[in-house]
Amino acid sequence: MSIMTISNSLDIYLLMAALLFGMGIYGIVQRQTFIGMLIAAELILSGASINFMAFNRFLAPDPTVGQIFTLFIMGIAAAEAAIALSIIIVVYRNYRSIETVDVVELNG
């Protein structure tokens, strides 16, 4: 088997999901802006969606369960992005910055 041949196996999907999840965690830890953290959170949710779809494709007896979970995750990601962007806009209007270190004194 050639190194350039990619087989359709569970390992490939799990590797891709782990890479997306790892990049998302790294982005959450390293980013200083709220927009960067939002993008990193979307990467984490994408990794989780790929996991659900991969396990659904290769291991689940019912083919619709993973797809339903993935659609649910996509809906949650869209709602999370909309709410987070609206909060970021309000923070920017009040503090004139979206850096996390500039809004440390923000309290509820």
Image (cartoon, rainbow, N blue to C red):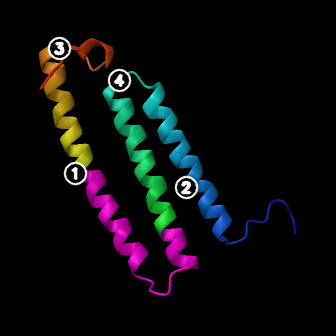
Amino acid type, residue under disc 3 in the picture = Tyr
- Secondary structure state at the residue bearing disc 1: helix
Looking at the image, do the residues carrying marks 1 and 3 touch, with CB atoms under 8 Å apart?
Answer: no
- Of the residues under marks 4 and 2, which one precedes in the sequence? 2
- Please, is residue 59 above or below residue 101 in the view? below
Amino acid type, residue under disc 2 in the picture = Ala
Q: Is residue 57 in the magenta section?
A: yes
- Please, is residue 42 above or below residue 26 in the view? below
Q: Is residue 74 left or right of residue 3?
A: left
- Of the residues under marks 3 and 2, which one precedes in the sequence? 2
- The crowding category of the residue bearing disc 3, from other C-alpha atoms within 10 Å (few below 14, some 14 to 19, many at least 20), is few
Looking at the image, do the residues carrying marks 2 and 1 touch, with CB atoms under 8 Å apart?
Answer: no
What is the number of the mark on residue 33? 4
- Of the residues under marks 4 and 3, which one precedes in the sequence? 4
Residue at image position (27%, 59%) is 75
C-alpha span from label 4 to label 2:
24 Å
What is the number of the mark on residue 95? 3
- Secondary structure state at the residue bearing disc 4: loop
Residue span colored magenta:
53-78
C-alpha span from label 2 to label 1:
22 Å
- Of the residues under marks 1 and 3, which one precedes in the sequence? 1
- Please, is residue 58 above or below residue 23 in the view? below
Residue at image position (60%, 60%) is 14
- Of the residues under marks 4 and 1, which one precedes in the sequence? 4
Q: Is residue 86 left or right of residue 62?
A: left
Amino acid type, residue under disc 1 in the picture = Ala
What is the number of the mark on residue 17? 2
Residue assigned mark 1: 79
C-alpha span from label 4 to label 3:
13 Å
Residue farthest right in this picture: 1
